[in-house]
Image (cartoon, coloured by chain):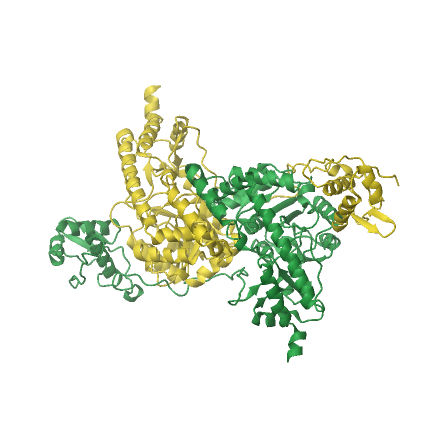
Chain colours: A yellow, B green
Amino acid sequence: MARWEVSFALERRAGVPLFQQIARAITADIRRGRLRPGDALPGTRTLARALGVQRLTVVAAFDDLVAEGWIVTERARGAFVSTDLPDPAPRRFASGGRSAAVAERPGFDLLPAPAPELPYDVPPGALLFAPSRPDVRLAPAALIGRAFRRAIARRPGALLAYGSPEGHPRLREAVARMLASTRGIAAGAANVCVTRGSQMAVSLLARALLRPGDVVAVEQLGYRSAWESFRLAGARVVGVPVDADGLRVDVLERLIATQPVRAVYVTPHHQFPTTVTMTAGRRLKLLELARVHRIAIIEDDYDYEFHYDGRPVLPLASADPAGVVAYVGTFSKVLAPALRLGYVVGTAPLIGRIAAHRSHVDIQGDRVLEYAVGELLDEGEIQRHIRRVRREYRARRDALASALVDRLGDRVTFTVPAGGIALWVGARSLDVEAWAAAARSRGAVVITAASFALDGRPRPYLRLGFASLDVTELHEGVRRLAAASPAENRARS
Amino acid sequence: MARWEVSFALERRAGVPLFQQIARAITADIRRGRLRPGDALPGTRTLARALGVQRLTVVAAFDDLVAEGWIVTERARGAFVSTDLPDPAPRRFASGGRSAAVAERPGFDLLPAPAPELPYDVPPGALLFAPSRPDVRLAPAALIGRAFRRAIARRPGALLAYGSPEGHPRLREAVARMLASTRGIAAGAANVCVTRGSQMAVSLLARALLRPGDVVAVEQLGYRSAWESFRLAGARVVGVPVDADGLRVDVLERLIATQPVRAVYVTPHHQFPTTVTMTAGRRLKLLELARVHRIAIIEDDYDYEFHYDGRPVLPLASADPAGVVAYVGTFSKVLAPALRLGYVVGTAPLIGRIAAHRSHVDIQGDRVLEYAVGELLDEGEIQRHIRRVRREYRARRDALASALVDRLGDRVTFTVPAGGIALWVGARSLDVEAWAAAARSRGAVVITAASFALDGRPRPYLRLGFASLDVTELHEGVRRLAAASPAENRARS
């Protein structure tokens, strides 16, 4: 057994205590194989002399090493490298006591990734007609910053502690009041579970409702991200067509006749992506079908607040004595995308299930933010903000519509929707994919119907979001879009 | 066909526009069956006269009803209730235009709920020896409030918008630097995914790694909430015993010989709940086993910051050239439970998978909070806070230990751990469940070993958390605990 020699120098100004430096040097030597199981270490006096430190410093280092199992001490005989250590191949550990960088590849097999929700790829300087984004420039940043700080300052103990996964009672109550007064949903706080935006709401519903193999009927065209949540829960997603009156409930009825359907996912207010509002007749039929067949209706009302002409249609959840609707709403569109705050409304037993699943996802929400937003709702601040934004978005909708008529009137068709944050634009005989590609190179990014299709195949439509661009940007965007249209391209070439 | 008569009065001061009141009253009558599909409505002039409003007000109401599909108008013939409506049974909808309360029971079948992570049931005035809670009274509330408001005020556009699911780059970089300088993990920002606390980290790892039927080996005793995350992903959880040196890696090796094991979940630093530190020999064997069998090691280092004596042992992740470790850490224990902020560290491909799953759970984190905490890390504020809290917790550990020796020295055994936030207390010959029940009635809530067992069976141990009670409370809590112990109960009765 070769005698181990000190091969390191202590750094007295390194900020790391000397005893730690000694312990680290010894473990490094064990790891690189210079010290092997059973090897004797020098005595504490000898080592202290060799290093020029107090003996107690070496004793402290050895105590650490014993506590961690690197060495054992035997009374009178001294210290030895533990024989409980395997004999590591020297090069598998970095030398010099420093750890190696994290490996490049995992040492185990990864499952296939779900289709990711990637941010749109927008070239610098390009204008994105984002299908469902609000304008973050209108977000009430100062209001939220103040409310957050005020809440944490006044109630630090209550708001920073663990709380219930359903969300802070103040926000649950404020949401229930808001839904009762504006959407005809007579919910109590017990019917509300606060979530991190509507994405978490849909994801939790998927977990609470779906078993592998269950069928979920969805709107086609529709919202791909919700489909992926259902698939991640093992469900099979089946498309039901949408026409000018909303979901084809008659087709859904035929589907139900052929196989059990566990849930239906709908956006009846401003259908995503086509913007149509489901008619009252379809709504009543859908509720009745769900009641009879015990099907859960997941009603995603992602942009209820943005309605400009006439009265918004009340949600399905406002006429649901059978308890078949799980209603999803969000503040992320009216406040800011990065403030993930949404909710599920439903029967108390459903809310209990959602909460149980939620506790396993992230324990609970951000109680400070929840309380702050509850306070802003009670004070009417959020409602005032919504009214301001609604006026602005209405002007943007009208600006986009008239710009399209002016510049592309002969090449596109659309109906101006009474609400929402996008126009659904038919491209007549144009090849939309080629047009979108040409527009992209001219600095206008548009999302085509293929992104909303279960089969991913092209269809001659675009969803032109108008909420995240101001009136000037919308005009410029449409100018670029028109310049990229095949007719003008042809005229120029 | 009976002639429909106006049966409602308008409220001129209700704050609801008159045309909306008219439209609502008509839909209410359709819903309750007073108006049926095909019924004629009065002309706009007649109705305006009956209600004492301008004709245009009624026209606006009808326009709304047409747009929503409740009625149809035929030129020259007038307006009719749409025949596209089904014939609803009158009592299924609430009368009077107001919606019914949310139903009590769901109209569809709910799946069994996962075992919920419920807050402990603590009677008023009782002291809870919480197994893994920090003291929210020490949370740096003012610091966080200021940092949040500062971040949102300075960078509203950048922080309130959509961002990448991996978290804000500033926090990812700050975490990577912190891990490199204090834990020997040479991670770059690309190796870090920010999560909502360690719960979301484990939940995302479960989704990214596990297929139904996969086996996950876990410490037994161990952390029930992690087990539930694995089970929710369809995995089978198999317990491996823990002794004074940590996980019995030899037992794990025998398990691997009999069946494929996909992942191992460990808390090697301060094992939960027993507080033991896994020895170096076991660590090296575990890493080697994982490398050879391509097993993912989920290393949950939930309380790394709280180490009091000697040098904390470096994580498994600091010696992982094979890329088998997914390392989980959290700020929720050092800052505040309600600020859900944690991270996964691993190979870049693993981080990509985690991020893809994360985007389907809640899109992204709270970028304002992420940026604010990144800034506080860069400024050293969080490190200063940790040092303050660490001193306090050390004093609490020592106070609990000496109180136990003083009052219960003959009835309990324990080893003072070098770190962590709890003592693991053996109860000798006492019936711990009876003792815990008696203590509860005397105002001391303790969590027994049964809570940490796969089989839920009692074992003669308690996990006495000391972090969430101050020194005075710890003394009082131990007094109550001693008063409830069978020996003293017997002496008194």
In terms of depth relative to the viewer, which is nearer, A305 or A49? Answer: A49
Residue B441, compared with residue A314, is above or below; it is below
Classify residue B5 as left or right of residue A324: left
Classify residue A451 as left or right of residue B58: right
**Does residue B407 appear in the picture of this structure?**
yes
Question: The N terminus of chain B appears in which quarter of the rendering?
Answer: bottom left
**Residue at left offset 62%, top offset 54%:** B393
**Does residue A276 appear in the picture of this structure?**
no
Numbered disc total: 0
- The residue at the far front in this view is A54
What is the x, y in percent for residue A12? 72, 36
What is the x, y in percent for residue B164? 49, 39
- The residue at the far bottom in this view is B493
Q: Which quadrant of the view contains residue A2?
A: top right
What is the x, y in percent for residue B198? 57, 50
Residue B434, compared with residue B244, is above or below; it is below
- The residue at the far top in this view is A493
Question: The C terminus of chain B appears in which quarter of the rendering?
Answer: bottom right
What is the x, y in percent for residue A36? 82, 43
Q: Which quadrant of the view contains residue A297?
A: bottom left
Classify residue A392 as left or right of residue B477: left
